[in-house]
Amino acid sequence: MKSKNNNLFYIPLFVAVLLSSGVQAQQQLSLENAISLARSSNADILVSTLEVEKAKQQRVSSRSLLLPTVNATAAANHYFQLPAFFGFGETTEGGKIPYGRFGGKDQLAAAITAVQPLYSPQAYSTLRRSHLQETESEVNASNTQLQVLAAVKQTYLTILVLEQRIKLQQESIARNKRVLQDARSLFAQGKALRVDTLRAFTSVKNLEPALTQLLYAVETQTLRLKTYIGLDSLQQIELTDSLTVPAPETIPDEAAVYAAARQNNPEYKALSLREDIGRESVKVASGLRKPVVAAVAQYQVQSQTNHFEYGQAYYPTSSYVGLQVTVPLFAGFSNQAKVKQASYAQQQATLVRKHAEDELHAEVHDVIARSQESVERLKTTAVVRETAQASYTIIQYRYKNGIASRLELTDAELALSTAQANYLEAVYDYLTARIQLDKLMGVVL
C-alpha cells in the first residue's frame, strides 16, 4: 500500500516535468542586449567579417608577386628507343642529315629553380590595389554593421510602438464595451432607443479587426528582430525597454550633417575607395605591356642508365644564375582591351561617386526636414492628447449625471482615441527620424 502511494506521488511530478520541458524559457531582451547580439550573431555582419578576411588573404597573395618563387621539379623517363641526335658525320648525297643514338634508355632529372622579380610594374600596382580593396572591405563591413544595427533599433522601436497601440486599442474597446453595456441596460429599461444599442455594438466591432491586425504586426516584427539578432524563431522574447520620449534635441544644420556624412558614413567612404581602386586597376592593366626583369637560379641533377639501374649510374650536377627579361610584344590586343576596360571602370566609379554626392544633398535636406517636422508635430499632438483626455473626462462626468448625450460621449471617445494614436505616431516618426539622421551621419548605434 505504501509503494502504491509513492507511485501516485510521482505521477503528477512526472507530468509537471513533461509540461515544463515543452515550454521554452522566455528571454528578457533590452535594446542594448539586442544590439550586442546583432554584433556577434547577425548573418550579414558575419559575412562581411569573412569578406575582410578574404581581402587580407588577397593582399598576401599580391605581395607574393614581389617575393621569390622556388620550384622543385623531377622527371623519370623510359625510352623504348634512345633519343636521336642529328649532326653526326657528314651530310649524305641525298641531302639527309645523319644522326646517332647514344645514352641510356632510362633517364632521370631533378632541379630546383628560384626566380626573384627585380622589376615588375604590375606587381607594385597589384599590391597597392589589394591594400585598397582590403580597406574597402573593412569599410563595407562597417557599413553593414551600421545598417543592421539601425534596423535592429528601428524594429525594436516598431514593436514597442505596436504594443502601445495595442494597449490603446484595448482601452478604446473597453470604453466602447462599457458604452454598449450601458446602452443595453437603458434599452432594457425603456430609457434608450434600439439604434443606440446598434450604434454602440457597431463601434465595438469596428475596433476589433484593427486589434487583430496589430497583434499580427507584432508577431511579424518580432520574427524580424529575431532574424537580425540571430535568435531561433521559436525562442520566446520579451522586450524590457519601454517607449520613452526624450526631450527634443537640437537638430544640426544641413552643412554639418553633409560634412559628417561624407566623413563618417562608410557608404560614401567606399565610393571614394572604389575610385582609387579603379586608378590602380588601370596601372595594373598598363603593367601588362611593360617589361619584367627577374633573377633566375637553378641547380640540376641528371642521370641516365639502362634497365633502371639507377644505383650504379652517375649523377652529374649543373647550376646557373642569370637575368631574365620578358618583353611583351603582342598578345592579340588583349592588353590594350584590359587597359580600356579598367579605364571605363574608373570612369564609372567617378560618376557614381559624384552622383551619390549630389543625391546626398537631397537626402540630408529630406532627413532634416522630417526631423524638424516630427519635433513640431510631437509638441502639437502632445497638447491635443492632453486636451482630448480632459474633454473626455468632463463629458463622461456630464454623461453620468445626465447632462451630456450619448452621442457627445461617443464623439469624445473617438477624439481621444484619435489624439492618442496621432501622438503615438508622432513619437514613432520623431524617433525614426533620429535613427535615420544618426545612420546618415555614420554614428554607430
Image (cartoon, rainbow, N blue to C red):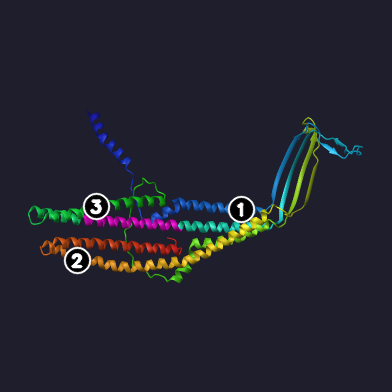
Picture quarter with the N terminus: top left
Q: Please indicate whether residue 22 sits to the left or right of residue 267 in the image.
A: left
Q: Residues within 10 Å of mark 3 (few under 14, many from 20)?
A: some
The answer to whether residue 166 is above or below residue 87 is: below
Query: What is the x, y in percent for residue 354?
Result: 53, 65
Which residue is the site of mark 2?
A: 391
Query: Which range is magenta?
Result: 146-173
Tell me the kind of residue under disc 1.
Val
Is residue 123 in view? no
Query: What is the x, y in percent for residue 292?
Result: 72, 55
The answer to whether residue 358 is above or below residue 237 is: below
Of the numbered discs in the image, which one, if any, rests on residue 60? Answer: 1
- The front one of 227 and 304 is 227
Which residue is the site of mark 3?
A: 208
- The Cα–Cα distance between marks 3 and 1, rounded to whole angstroms, is 63 Å
Is 148 magenta? The answer is: yes
Q: Residue at x 73, y 45 (%)?
A: 112
Picture quarter with the C terminus: bottom left
Is 218 magenta? The answer is: no
Of the numbered discs in the image, which one, if any, rests on residue 300? Answer: none
Query: What is the x, y in percent for residue 347?
Result: 58, 62
Asked which quadrant contains residue 375, the reply is: bottom left
